[in-house]
């Protein structure tokens, strides 16, 4: 149990070997995910380097008070530091036997690579000699010190990391060696001196007066000052640009803060019996039950994820001389952690002189493909229930499986192959920087971000690009982990690619191909192939593990013993989309927008009807439109036979049916200038005058929805007659059409009453003509605040309500969606004036209107069916709210139907109290 007055929690053993851990895995929101899992591993007896966590709440208090420490916290941290020194029998900065620590971030949710870390803290000009004396390894001592100066300078003081990398590169060139590991102890000692000069030349003395000695920025020798500055820097990294962007992408709140974990260093760079690595207990790309990951001999952990050196697969670890015992122990720990957490785990480890240390574990990020496979396997292995398995799949991830892949029959010009780091295919133009990726995306040009290896600062470009391609790094590199989390295709470690980012080109070894910015390539993250040119992509099918999980989700949704049933329908306006909806598991159509059927040649017909003053022209237009609509509804209702289909009567702003007055005026001016037929000019001018006479200042709030049908009743009548006639004809053929007629944009009960009477009269006429009973429900779309708050009156005239949250959000906020989404919503999100885009995720205020509408409507009509058909009907967070609001179904675009099926089941499981965790 967390103590609100406690800012620091310890983990690990004391000097006598007794466990003194104060936190556990339930305290993610206090000590962060990393701290909670370190504490949990310590509790179950795994070899965890001791340390302590400074809480997330301390970060929030520090950041919220202009980076000022709350009273007493520094004393509490100092006491934890002294306790750690006592436990280890060493102290920071001891010139004979120094204690060295890492300072790492640890948010409640995993944010890989987004915040900062400092390793080897405690080294200075004296303690480095103590490390060398203790280890009898000068190279190790100087390598550790140069790493610390490099990382501290960049993370804490903001010095450009490339300055240090360039110095290392120049040193290797001067020595004629290829790898960092080829540099000698003397080389590294000289680099330490050079790095301290870089520090002095580039640190702002006014911003950091505490490191000024005799007027010069001097690398701090006081380890306690090093520790304080490092902790402050890690807290500060919570609000860095890449962390903020990552949280926006993953809907993680900004007010959680990050913990800071101070932990004893374990070294993987002490020689060939030392190593470091990152591993998963199962394959995070496809879910196969196999140990998966990378390691490096004689390296530190940052080397693995940075992609600086090409790694070895984890399966080879126990075959390496000097590492066999630790490799076998690691495999035992894999099994133990899976059995303890009942999930696939992500692990960071170090082997120091043959001894294994566990540095971190967490529930591993995985692709959608892997999430499905692992959830099903774990249910069958008895680790979890079916309900927990359904909750293990993040609905947003399903997008990875519902969009195109490379056509298996395509002829491919394969340029090179790398590691299949994140599945899916992407086609785009080559770009070599994140800034260029953003620029291309803003121009509407799909692109592939090609890098030697990505780093956290590349996140903007990774989000903007269709896919990511790197020439270095393994399957646990930054590019791979972030791409999998985003669901973006990624191919890593394509060694044949020789990238010259400065000149925006990449040569492909073994070929004469040189890729330049703007060249089109295709990457296949499922196989690791890189293909020259654009390749045909194909639509996926619901099959295999996805089909299994969705069937389980449907069983749960339909199980009345678990709670209320929520259906899933689709928005579809044509037979092709209707067919696709059924293939994706929709139970019907929740919205068929008939105005989409009046485009093309039909626009002229309806314009003739609205604008003509000639009765014969109007009558002919009505006849033509009726015939066309009968054909439309015959096809749609035949496709949806046996499934409900809500057909919304015309609901466009009037101007969408009319010619653009500006374009018409230009056309008239050109005709006059070229001496066209005066009679034709007069006809066009008369048309312009009629259109101008019908102009509206705000067409979205003008003559549309039910108002259009009230002003032009023939439009409603022809549509209803076409629907009823198509239904009667299909019934006569033995089919089972189930149309429902929806009246749009009502604001008063009287509007609905008059239009419903009109609809029912036409239906009765068709029933009499065909001698049948059609039984077509009539309902309305609730998309205006007045309709929601007077639903107790409107509900008397409705068989169903469908909430149109696009317009309900517009009218509740007073926002014009077409204008505000690009104009100021991004700024509102950044300034925290809005938590989410209300047109993507249901706003809490709009949700209250929906709740009032449901309650009022059912008060008037207890049998009222309530659904939603706006954009938010396919958003997982919104679907959970809709379930809690009592809706009977959600309706969304066809491609989001599987997402809605899964989310609706998860919402029901949560409401029933049977929730496992939903993977983030």
Image: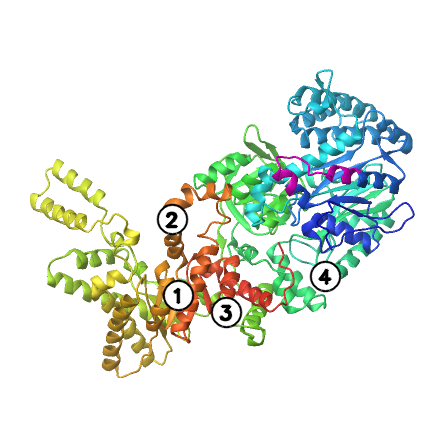
Q: Quadrant of residue 308?
A: top right
Give me the C-alpha separation between circle 2 and circle 3: 30 Å
What's drawn in magenta, residue-wise?
60-78
Give me the C-alpha separation between circle 1 and circle 4: 41 Å
Q: Position of residue 700 (x, y in %)?
A: 30, 52
Residue 566 image label: 3
Residue 802 image label: 1
Question: Can residue 573 be seen in this snapshot?
Answer: no
Marks 2,1: beta carbons within 8 A? no
Residue 342 image label: 4
Of residue 809 and residue 428, the one placed in the foreground of this image is 809
Furthest toward the front, the residue is 71
Q: Quadrant of residue 182?
A: top right
User: What secondary structure is found at the residue carrying circle 4?
Assistant: loop
Give the mark nearest the N terminus, 1 or 3: 3
At 43% from the left and 67% from the top, the residue drawn is 854
Q: Verify whether residue 388 appears in magenta.
A: no
At 71% from the left and 32% from the top, the residue drawn is 229
């Amino acid at each position: 149990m967390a103590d609100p007055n406690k800012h620091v929690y310890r983990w690990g053993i004391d000097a006598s070997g007794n466990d003194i851990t104060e936190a556990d895995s339930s305290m993610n929101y206090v000590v962060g995910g990393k701290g909670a899992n370190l504490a949990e591993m310590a509790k179950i007896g795994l070899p965890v380097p001791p340390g302590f966590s400074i809480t997330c709440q301390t970060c929030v208090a520090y950041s919220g008070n202009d980076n000022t420490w709350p009273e007493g916290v520094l004393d509490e941290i100092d006491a934890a530091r002294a306790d750690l020194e006592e436990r280890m029998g060493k102290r920071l900065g001891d010139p004979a036997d120094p204690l060295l620590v890492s300072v790492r971030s640890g948010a409640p949710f995993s944010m890989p690579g987004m915040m900062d870390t400092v390793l080897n803290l405690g080294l200075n000009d004296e303690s480095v000699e103590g490390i060398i004396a203790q280890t009898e390894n000068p190279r190790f001592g100087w390598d550790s010190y140069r790493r610390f100066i490099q990382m501290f300078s960049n993370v804490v003081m903001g010095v450009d990391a490339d300055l240090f990398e360039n110095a290392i590169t120049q040193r290797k060139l001067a020595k004629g060696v290829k790898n960092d590991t080829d540099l000698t102890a003397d080389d590294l000692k000289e680099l330490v001196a050079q790095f301290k000069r870089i520090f002095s030349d580039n640190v702002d003395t006014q911003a950091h007066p505490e490191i000024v000695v005799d007027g010069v920025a001097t690398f701090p020798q006081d380890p306690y000052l090093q520790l304080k500055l490092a902790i402050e820097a890690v807290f500060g990294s919570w609000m860095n640009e890449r962390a903020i962007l990552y949280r926006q992408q993953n809907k993680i709140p900004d007010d959680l803060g990050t913990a800071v974990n101070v932990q004893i260093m374990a070294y993987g760079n002490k020689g060939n019996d030392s190593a470091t690595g990152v591993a998963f207990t199962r394959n995070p790309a496809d879910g196969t039950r196999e140990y998966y990951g990378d390691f490096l001999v004689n390296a530190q952990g940052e080397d693995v994820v940075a992609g600086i050196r090409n790694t070895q697969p984890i399966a080879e670890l126990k075959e390496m001389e000097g590492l066999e015992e630790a490799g076998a122990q690691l495999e035992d720990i894999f099994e133990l952690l899976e059995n303890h957490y009942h999930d696939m785990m992500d692990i960071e480890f170090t082997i120091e002189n043959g001894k294994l240390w566990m540095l971190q574990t967490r529930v591993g990020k995985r692709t959608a493909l892997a999430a499905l496979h692992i959830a099903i396997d774990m249910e069958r292995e008895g680790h979890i229930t079916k309900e927990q398995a359904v909750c293990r799949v993040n609905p947003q991830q399903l997008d990875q499986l519902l969009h195109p892949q490379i056509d298996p029959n395509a002829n491919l010009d394969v340029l090179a192959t790398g590691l299949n780091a994140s599945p899916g295919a992407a086609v785009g133009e080559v770009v070599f920087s994140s800034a260029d990726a953003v620029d291309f995306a803003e121009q509407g040009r799909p692109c592939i971000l090609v890098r030697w290896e990505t780093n956290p600062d590349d996140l903007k470009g990774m989000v903007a690009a269709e896919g990511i391609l790197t020439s270095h790094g393994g399957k646990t590199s930054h590019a791979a982990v972030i791409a999998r989390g985003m669901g973006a295709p990624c191919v890593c470690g394509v060694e044949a690619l020789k990238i010259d980012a400065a000149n925006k080109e990449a040569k492909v070894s073994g070929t004469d191909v040189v890729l330049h910015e703007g060249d089109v390539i295709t990457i296949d993250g499922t196989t690791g192939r890189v293909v020259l040119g654009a390749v045909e992509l194909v639509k996926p099918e619901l099959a295999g593990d996805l089909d299994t999980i969705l069937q389980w989700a449907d069983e749960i949704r339909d199980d009345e013993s678990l709670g209320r049933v929520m259906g899933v329908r689709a928005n579809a306006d044509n037979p092709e989309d209707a067919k696709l909806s059924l293939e994706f598991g929709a139970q019907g159509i929740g919205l068929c927008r008939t105005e989409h059927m009046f485009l093309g040649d039909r626009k002229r017909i309806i314009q003739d009807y609205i604008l003509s003053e000639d009765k014969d022209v109007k009558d002919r237009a009505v006849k033509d439109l009726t015939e066309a609509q009968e054909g439309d509804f015959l096809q749609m209702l035949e496709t949806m036979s046996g499934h409900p289909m809500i057909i919304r009567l015309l609901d466009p702003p009037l101007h969408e049916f009319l010619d653009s007055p500006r374009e018409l005026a230009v056309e008239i001016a050109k005709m006059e200038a070229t001496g066209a037929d005066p009679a034709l000019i007069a006809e066009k001018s008369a048309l312009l005058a009629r259109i101008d006479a019908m102009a509206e200042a705000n067409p979205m709030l003008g003559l549309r929805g039910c108002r259009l049908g009230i002003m032009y009743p023939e439009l409603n009548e022809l549509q209803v007659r076409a629907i009823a006639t198509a239904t009667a004809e299909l019934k006569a053929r033995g089919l089972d059409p189930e149309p429902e007629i929806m009246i749009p944009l009502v604001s008063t009960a009287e509007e609905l009453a008059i239009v419903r009477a009109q609809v029912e009269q036409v239906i009765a006429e068709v029933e009499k003509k065909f001698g049948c009973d059609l039984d077509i429900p009539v309902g309305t779309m609730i998309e205006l605040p007045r309709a929601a708050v007077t639903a107790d009156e409107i509900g008397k005239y409705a068989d169903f309500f469908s909430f149109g949250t696009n317009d309900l959000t517009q009218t509740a906020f007073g926002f014009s969606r077409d204008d505000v989404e690009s104009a100021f919503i991004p700024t509102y999100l950044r300034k925290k004036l809005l938590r989410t885009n209300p047109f993507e995720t249901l706003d809490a205020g709009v949700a209250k209107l929906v709740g009032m509408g449901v309650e009022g409507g059912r008060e008037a009509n207890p049998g009222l069916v309530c659904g939603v058909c706006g954009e938010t009907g396919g958003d997982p967070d919104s679907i959970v709210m809709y379930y809690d609001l009592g809706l009977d179904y959600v309706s969304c675009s066809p491609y989001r139907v599987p997402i809605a099926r899964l989310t609706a089941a998860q919402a029901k499981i949560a409401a029933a109290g049977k929730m496992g965790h939903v993977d983030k």
